Amino acid sequence: MPAGGKTTTPRRSALQQGVDLLARREYSQRELRQCLSARGHDAAATESALDELAARHYQSDARYAEMLARSRATQGYGPRRIRMELAAQGIARSQVQAAMDTLNHDWRRIAGDLVRRRCGTLRDETQRRRAAQLLLRRGFETATVRCVTRTEIEDAADGAD
C-alpha cells in the first residue's frame, strides 16, 4: 500500500472511458474527442478509441444527429436552429440532412403551439412582433413565422366578433 494508506486505481484506457461516457448518453465524435482529451488521453489513443467505438456501433454521428434533432424539435426549436446546433457539433451536412428528413414534424403547428403557450392570443402589432422574434430566435423559417403570426392575428380578430 502506498504512503498515506491510499490505494491507486489503474488509469482507465481511452476506450473504457469512451464506453463509460456513451453508457450515459449519445455523444458526437467531436464531443467524445474533447472529453477524452480533457481526461488526459493523447491524440493517438483518443483516435484509436473513437475508431473502435464507431466500429462496434457504440458511437454514431448519424444516431446522435437523429436523437438531437428529435429532442430539439420536441422542445419547440425550429429547423434552422437544429441544423446550426448539429453543424456546431461537427456533424456532416449529409448526416444533418438525413436527421432532418427523419423528422415528420409540422413546423407551423409547433410554432403556433409555442406562440400560444408563450404569448397567448396576438391582439396587436407589438405582440405580433414579439411572437415573431421568439420564433426567429428559436430557429423557425421566416415563411413559417409570417404564417403563424398572421394566422394568430386573424384568429384573434375572428374571435372578437
Image (tube, rainbow, N blue to C red):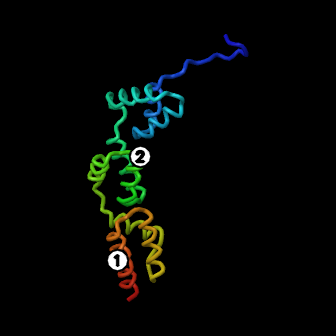
Q: Are marks 1 and 2 in contact (CB under 8 Å)?
A: no
> What is the spatial separation of the Cα atoms under label 1 and label 2, in whole angstroms?
35 Å
Q: Please give the label number shown on residue 151.
A: 1
User: Which residue is rendered at x = 35% and y = 74% of the image?
Assistant: 146
Q: Position of residue 124 (x, y in %)?
A: 45, 83
Q: Position of residue 61 (x, y in %)?
A: 35, 40
Residue 23 % position (x, y): 44, 33
Quarter location, residue 116: bottom left
Q: Is residue 7 above or below residue 80?
A: above
The residue at which mark 2 appears reads as 89
51 lies above or below 11: below
Q: Give the quadrant of the N terminus.
A: top right
Kindly identify the residue that appears in the image at 34 percent across and 77 percent down. 151
Q: Quadrant of residue 109?
A: bottom left
Label 1 is placed on what type of residue?
Answer: Thr
| Res 26 label | none
Going from the N terminus, do you reach mark 1 or mark 2 first? 2
Identify the residue at the far top of this view: 1
Quadrant for residue 79, please give it. Answer: bottom left
Looking at the picture, tell me which residue is in the foreground, 137 or 151. Answer: 137
Residue 95 to residue 80: above or below: above
Q: What residue sits 30% from the left and 62% below the top?
A: 106
The residue mark sitting in front, 1 or 2, is: 2
How many other residues sit within 10 Å of disc 2, few (<14), some (14-19) or many (≥20)?
some
Q: Residue at x 36, y 63 (%)?
A: 110
Residue 78 versus residue 69 in the image, above or below: below
